[in-house]
Image: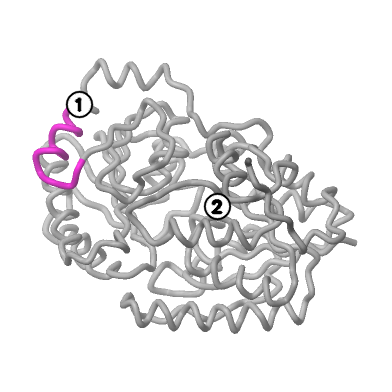
Amino acid sequence: MRKVAIFTGTRAEYGLLYWVIKGLQAAREIELQLFVGGMHLSPEFGYTLKQIEADGIPVTEKLEFLLSSDTPVGMGKSMGLALISGVEVLARHQPDILVLLGDRFEALALAQAALVNSTPIAHIHGGEVTEGVMDDAMRHAITKMSHLHFTATEVYRNRVIQLGEAPASVFNVGAPGIDNIRKLQLLSREALAKELGLSLDSPYFVLTYHPLTLCDENNQADVVSRLCHILLAHKRHKLIITYPNADKNGREIICAIEALAQQYPERIHVVKSLGQLRYLSLLKHCVMVVGNSSSGLIEAPTFNIPTINIGSRQNGRVLSDSVISCGDDEQSIKLAVENGLTESFVQKCKEIKNKYEGENTSERIVSSLINFPLESIVQKNFYDIN
């Protein structure tokens, strides 16, 4: 049996991988190994390991490496511990291929561990560009350590090939997170309100703002506060905010949103982790997604709702026509929100097609993981486009 290992270190990443994991779990010719670490094991970020266990997916190994710190030193030490843990579990379980998604530091550490263990890597969501964060460099580094690639658009496929990867190993399959929208039975507005323990009778915004890890200025809490006050000016609307990632300077954002929730308890609701079902249900019923999270660009357009993409974090990504990008100053944010709420733009969003949608995305990834030849795959030739 082919042994396929999957690593997940965050709540969002697990949600995107869910149908790939379930597909491999059901495949008789596959032995699934699931390595779980990082934010999943942290009570500070909702201890989301319990969601994986509730989904009935056996965890092969738990990797404890995330320090309770958001400084560059703390992040670097977490990366070091993740590398040590990754080398140990790969040597112990010897998978035939390791599946990694995205661009976070945990994934980079596991890619390094796989490299020294001569374990082939299948990488999902390569070729993308996010100029405002260090994840951009990490993503491309993971691509160069990987051997099988699943991209979300043709633009990204071409970029992976531009990085020297052989076209026969690069597949444009679409974004796997959209499978959740198609396959999950999303909650009704009433059921969602009961799950969250709050009233959703009035319209609401969904806000997620992650740190800009390449930004040296210590003003990200100010941006979040400015953004919230602009949204609160729309008196009929509530604001539901999700926690940022465990990245450099993330705690200043957490402190800012928690302080605002205490100041406006009837208008602002903060959650550490929603899980895919509640998060996607929240998007289904909201009037607008605001912030700088990739979910506003990749998943939200499938719901035909406006997204306000703030600042430089996502600069370089392919954007659907339902996305309005703006700066992080008050005037730019205010104008973008007002434009996004106009009847004409709301109607335009109802007619757009999400540029990240593929066909049978997770099934195609699973099929490749089962059938793609792995003999001699570790030794790659650089593909020169000239």
**Image location (x, y in percent) of residue 364:** 73, 40
**331 falls in the magenta region:** yes
Picture quarter with the C terminus: top right
In this rendering, the label closer to the viewer, 2 or 1? 1
**Is 107 placed above or below 136 here?**
below
Distance from disc 2 to disc 1, alpha carbons, whole Å, reads 31 Å
Give the magenta part as a residue range: 327-338
Asked whether the residues under the numbered discs 2 and 1 touch, taking CB atoms below 8 Å apart as contact, a structural biologist would say no
Figure quadrant of the N terminus: bottom right
Above or below, comparing residue 385 to residue 54 in the picture: above
Secondary structure of the residue carrying tag 2 is helix
Q: Residue at x 21, y 51 (%)?
A: 268
Amino acid on which disc 1 is placed: Asn
- Disc 2: which residue: 15
Judging depth in this view, the residue of 66 and 267 nearest the camera is 66
Considering depth in this image, is 26 or 225 the residue closer to the camera?
225
Q: Name the foreground residue: 340 vs 331.
A: 331
Residue count near mark 2 (Cα–Cα under 10 Å), binned few <14, some 14–19, many ≥20:
many
Furthest residue to the front? 386
Q: At 47% across and 30% down in the image, what residue appears?
A: 302
Residue visible at 56% across and 50% down in the picture: 126
Q: Residue at x 69, y 79 (%)?
A: 89
| Comes first in the chain, label 2 or label 1 | 2
Is 62 drawn above or below residue 198 in the view shown?
below
- Horizontal side of residue 347 vs 202, given as left or right: right
- The crowd level at tag 1 (other Cα within 10 Å; few <14, some 14-19, many 20+) is some
Q: In the shown orientation, is residue 289 left or right of residue 260?
A: right
Magenta stretch containing residue 58, yes or no? Answer: no
Indicate the position of residue 220 as horizontal and vertical percent values: 20, 60
- Tag 1 residue: 339
Coloring applied to the structure = one colour
- Residue 86: image quadrant is bottom right
